[in-house]
Image (spheres, rainbow, N blue to C red):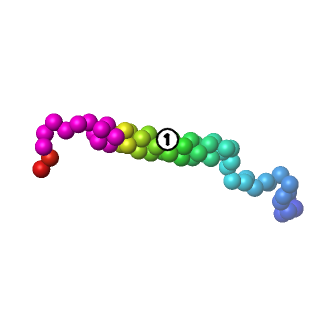
Amino acid sequence: MSGVSDVSTTRRRGPHRRGPMPAVLACLLVVAALALGVWVQFGERQAQDTAASRPRTFPSR
């Protein structure tokens, strides 16, 4: 036994790379949240427009 370890055979393992999948998933979640927000705001705007254009059949108090 010489007591000297062979450094070339003991490699350190670097951080586990998962590829671009988490970044793509994060981008898709952001796009989905933006689309949902736009859709909700558009729906609210349409509901307000239809309510405002409808003639009232009862007197407002």
Q: Of 27 and 54, which appears nearest the observer?
A: 54
Relative to 7, say whether 21 is above or below. Answer: above
* Residue at x 75% of width, y 55% of height: 12
Left or right: where 28 falls relative to 15: left
- Left or right: where does residue 1 sit relative to residue 59? right
Q: Is 60 within the magenta?
A: no
The residue labelled by disc 1 is: 35
Instruction: Report the residue that reaches farthest toward the bottom.
Output: 3
**Residue 5 in which image quadrant:** bottom right
Left or right placement of residue 57 versus residue 5 in this view: left
- The part of the image, by quadrant, that contains residue 18 is top right
Residue 45 located left or right of residue 23: left
Amino acid type indicated by mark 1: Ala
Image x and y of residue 9, in percent: 83, 52
Measuring from the top left, give residue 41's x and y in whole percent: 41, 44
Q: Where is residue 40 drawn, in percent x and y?
A: 40, 42
Q: Can you see residue 14?
A: yes
Is 58 inside the magenta-drawn segment? Answer: yes
Disc 1 packing (10 Å; few <14; some 14–19; many ≥20): few
Name the quadrant containing residue 6. bottom right
Q: Residue at x 53, y 46 (%)?
A: 30
Task: From the viewer's side, name the closer residue of 47 and 1.
Answer: 47
Residue in front for this viewpoint, 52 or 22? 52
| Circle 1: element type | helix
**In front here: 30 or 4?**
30
Which residue does the image show at 12% across and 50% down from the upper left? Answer: 61
The residue range painted magenta reads 48-59
Q: Report the residue at 36% width, 42% height from top.
A: 44
